[in-house]
Image (cartoon, helix red, strand yellow):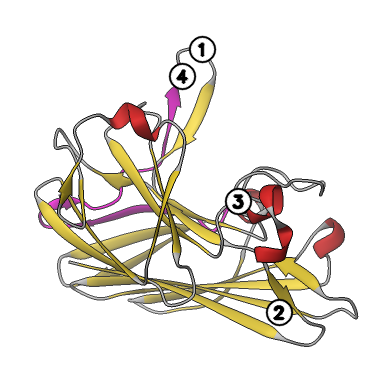
Amino acid sequence: MDIELYSGGTKAIISTEGGYVTNLSNELGDILYPKRQLMAPDGSEKTRGGSHVCMPNFGPGGTTTLAQHGYGRTSNWQVINTSVTRAELMCEGIGDYTNMESYLTYELSDTAFTMQLRLKNTGTLPLNVAPAFHPYWYRGAQMPTVNDIAYEDLAEFNEAKFILGHTQQLGLAGRQLVLRSDELLHWAQWTDQLGDYFCLEPSQSGFAFNEDISRADTLEPGSEKLYKFTISW
């Protein structure tokens, strides 16, 4: 099921399959590279584009049984409520995270888009969480600039490179984006160059599940944690 949000000339499309933002655009064109299937050099198909949540882990699951980027992007999300500019979705947990409820809220204005993840532990044991958002920014033929630094060779981002901060400025496709999160301070820069996109992704602590689980947040029984990410232009 698709949910369409509108504000002025800005439009977002949200899919309940994976909680994906499959499209974000305005009168100047695409802001996110639209979600689609692309062919990799080895002949395999890759899902690329849009933006999805990574939860409870960003990157590999480490010693857990969790898949790459967790289970949020492969789960069906229930619609809690919607309006013209706002949608709230909910996802039940699986496996060791059966007792975690996850809520995604997307809110659109003429010049901004906010993604919010709320995690709630309904069980009796603490849970490790290190979530992220994974947007694919449309760059067109333009090489990106990050915080006014111009990039010339995207091959250096075949493996993710991290930068820190509350706010990042991203220039691409003839526009300037301001990206902000007060909870997700480790930003992954990455692209496999299968399409005209560049990823600048806010995460709680990078690949904590695979590298150092102590960097993850602890979601205590009965508690909630909120992670917010705002894009403005």
Residue located farthest toward the bottom when viewing the structure as drawn: 222
Q: Is 233 positioned to the left or the right of 49 in the image?
A: left
Q: Mark 1 against mark 3, which lies toward the viewer?
A: 3
Q: Is 1 positioned to the left or the right of 28 in the image?
A: right
Residue underneath mark 4? 40
| Residue 189 locus on image (x, y percent) | 38, 46
| Residue 193 locus on image (x, y percent) | 34, 28
Tag 2, which secondary structure?
A: strand
Mark 1 and mark 3 lie on one chain; the one further toward the N terminus is 1
Mark 3 and mark 2 lie on one chain; the one further toward the N terminus is 2
Q: Which residues are magenta?
A: 16-40
Identify the amino acid type marked 3. Answer: Phe
Identify the amino acid type marked 4. Answer: Ala
Q: Are marks 3 and 4 in contact (CB under 8 Å)?
A: no
> In terms of image quadrants, where is residue 128?
bottom right
The span from disc 1 to disc 3 (Cα, nearest Å) is 27 Å
Residue 54, above or below 173: below
Which label is found at residue 43?
1
Identify the amino acid type marked 2. Answer: Lys
Q: Residue at x 14, y 37 (%)?
A: 142
* Dot 1 crowding, Cα within 10 Å, few <14, some 14–19, many 20+: few
